[in-house]
Image (spheres, rainbow, N blue to C red):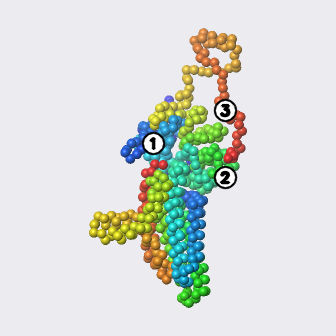
Amino acid sequence: MSIASSSSRTVPFSLGRLGIVAGNTFLEAVRQKLFNFLLLLAVALVASAQLFREFNFGSSELKFISDFGFGAMVFFGSTLTIAATAQLFFSEIENRTALTILAKPIWRTEFIFGKFLGVFAVVGVFCALTTVLLLALLYHRETALMTANPEAFENGRIIHYGDLVLMGVLQWLKFGVLAAITLLIASFSNTNLYTVVMGFFVLVICHLQYLARDAYGAVASLPLRLLVQALGYVFPNFQVFNLADQIGIGQGIGAEVFLRVAGYALIYIAVIGGLAVYSFRNREI
Amino acid sequence: MTSPSPASAIEITGLTKDFSLNLRGIKLRAVDNLTLRVPEGEVFGLLGPNGSGKSTTIKIILGLLEPTAGECKVFGVPSGRVDSRLNVGYLPEAPYFYRYLSGTELVRFYGRICGVPRKQLDERVREVIDWVGLSGAAHRRVGTYSKGMLQRIGLAQALVHDPRLIILDEPTAGVDPVGSAEISELIRKLKTQGKTVLITSHLLAQIEDICDRVAILDKGKLIVEGSVDELVGLHDRQSLIVDSLPAAELEELRRWLASRGHALNAVERPRTRLDQLFLSKVSRPQKGGDAQ
């Protein structure tokens, strides 16, 4: 009797198989030059933030380093998420490794969510590294400023490092939503290029959709207003992840805000991931 | 009393597959009302020119494509179901595997996907890699493998979960005659282990050598199907191979046969086959993989 058939005739959904696909996706991604290149660029950009010294000593400079660092994370993280998701999906299709995997007793749901989790892990490593570097830079600079200008820090350190970590986590979740969107596009797209272009297109929509909502939210035409509201639900609003003004210096992220934004991201990941699975199940390999 | 026919590894009934060519609804019929049965334990050759529907049929058997009409069962389970693939190993045409994994890591990866128990996995991976003759190159990255080695590691990943049915799509495409002969030898070994093998190939001599039965497809339709002996044997003729005869004795033999009502239809010199000559002249690689 064969090894595989000795257990059972049915094949239940398996988190183990999903993890195997995710692990392999992660391994493939970290061995790609693109990942290393973007990681190096992001690290270099975050590190270069401390070179900008034309600002006044004190909180303005620290705020600048914080904003600049998160800006680099968002820019390179978005690029990495879209490029890596499309590349890692289409490498399986174009090299026909998807054939050998899907010819095994594995659900397509496991394959798609495995791919997602692999990319999500890669982006998680990226966010963790850039966040840690940013924290180290801020701590180093704040310590130097405290020595040079003690009266500005008479109440102790002004940076909320815990909130910066939460901000890094929220950016990671935002990239998760973006990865799910890119995977959904890839599930029905025929080319890598189309997926990448559409991914960036949707990224811009998600960042700017609040403008459309503000502009058309008050229009008299009911159908137009409903359409804009519907589109507002279809495309996630990436502005909700932008808490840069609330964090870092003087203010903090409340637990309620953090959980609400994290929940918002997880719901979108689940729904868009589900749509990607549905689309991929009907795809002819 | 007739012996019961063996159970079916694959049973295809009235299978049709159309592909949409464009948005106007024009369709290409890749497989047309195909009915086919592959008995368990046989080596079955699926032949046909390019575009005849062989790969489409294989993809339907593997559940990678949905049939437009008809049905396909693997060991009695509809091929669209995940559990139909529990006992199937597959080597695709011109396989490309993860270049960054070593041979051992690759086979291990597929073994884990197939649910080979952890306790048996290492042993099983070693066993199949040794079986396909790649133990010496098992720790090299797949990206450094030659074409023949890729086919063999592909065979190892197809066998890692010890399936009852192995599907080989052009396993010798692009492989040199030595590698091709080795793959033929492995297929023969699979048959002795009681495995069912479905193979497609354009090397008809190889198919003739290793297959019990063949089916020929053309434009998606089944043209002919039967055992190799039935299809290529000339049952009303025999050949006698003797030492060279002088002309006079040959003439005497012809007259002797004619006196008994038989005709001597041809007098030929037996020839060896070119592939056999090639294999007898060139050296075979050491176990552990050929040079890149």
Report if the CB atoms under discs 3 and 2 are less than 8 Å apart: no
Say whether disc 3 or disc 2 marks the residue closer to the N-terminus.
2
Q: At numbered mark 1, what does the secondary structure look like: helix, strand or loop?
A: strand
Q: Are marks 2 and 1 on the same chain?
A: yes
**Residue A123 relative to residue A208: left or right:** right
* Residue at (65% x, 33% y) in the render: B275
Q: How dense is the environment of label 1, judged by Cα within 10 Å: few (below 14), some, or many (20 and up)?
A: many
The residue under label 1 is B72
Residue depicted at x 43% and y 67%:
A207
**Residue drawn 59% across and 40% down?**
B173
Task: Establish if A45 lies above or below A19.
Answer: below
Callout 3 crowding tier (Cα within 10 Å): few <14, some 14–19, many ≥20: few
Q: Amino acid at mark 2?
A: Arg
Question: What amino acid is at disc 3?
Answer: Gln
| Residue B189 seen | no
| Secondary structure at numbered mark 2 | loop
Name the side, left or right, on which A84 lies relative to B129. left
